[in-house]
């Protein structure tokens, strides 16, 4: 198990790390987000995605818990998610 050094990260890797992603409720939204995450976390289980529709069903919120192995991996995931036009927000 790797310990963080200095102010690099408050996390100890590897760890389970939940990522929240929001976007318009389209037929391809979940697949698009899962594909982006699996580029950096190939062991991510797509069947574990939790979904929640907005009140008017126009938006979809996803929670994806990845097994994070480094701060760089998380940064790369967030970079790809925020660069995606289908993603309105990633937390």
Image (tube, grey):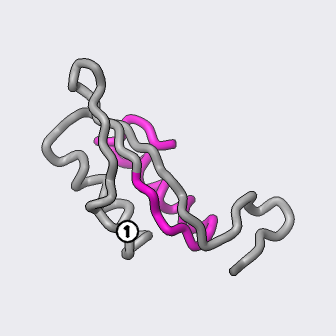
- For label 1, the residue is 44
- The quadrant holding residue 71 is bottom right
Most extreme residue toward the bottom is 1
- Residue 13 appears at what percent x and percent y? 65, 71
* Quadrant of the drawing holding the N terminus: bottom right
* Residue closer to the observer: 26 or 43: 43
Identify the residue shown where x is 26% and y is 61%: 47
7 part of magenta stretch: no
* Residue closer to the observer: 34 or 49: 49
Most extreme residue toward the top is 56
Q: Is residue 44 left or right of residue 15?
A: left
- Residue 58 appears at what percent x and percent y? 22, 25
- The quadrant holding residue 22 is top left
- The quadrant holding residue 74 is bottom right
Identify the residue shown where x is 32% and y is 53%: 49
80 part of magenta stretch: yes
The secondary structure type at the circle numbered 1 is loop
- Residue 15 appears at what percent x and percent y? 59, 67
- Residue 57 appears at what percent x and percent y? 21, 25
Q: Is residue 69 left or right of residue 56?
A: right
* Residue closer to the observer: 47 or 40: 47
Q: Is residue 70 left or right of residue 46?
A: right
Few, some or many C-alpha atoms within 10 Å of disc 1 (few <14, some 14-19, many ≥20)? some
Identify the residue shown where x is 29% and y is 62%: 46
Look at the picture and state if 43 lies above or below 71. below
Most extreme residue toward the right is 6
Look at the picture and state if 41 lies above or below 77. below
Residue stretch in magenta: 64-91
């Amino acid at each position: 198990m790797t310990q963080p050094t200095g102010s690099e990260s408050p996390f100890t890797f590897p760890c389970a790390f939940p990522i929240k992603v929001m976007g318009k409720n389209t037929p391809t939204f979940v697949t698009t987000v899962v594909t982006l995450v699996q580029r950096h976390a190939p062991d991510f289980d797509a069947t574990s995605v939790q979904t929640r529709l907005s009140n008017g069903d126009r938006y979809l919120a996803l929670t994806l818990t990845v097994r994070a192995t480094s701060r760089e991996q998380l940064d790369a995931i967030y970079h790809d998610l925020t660069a995606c036009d289908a993603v309105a927000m990633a937390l």
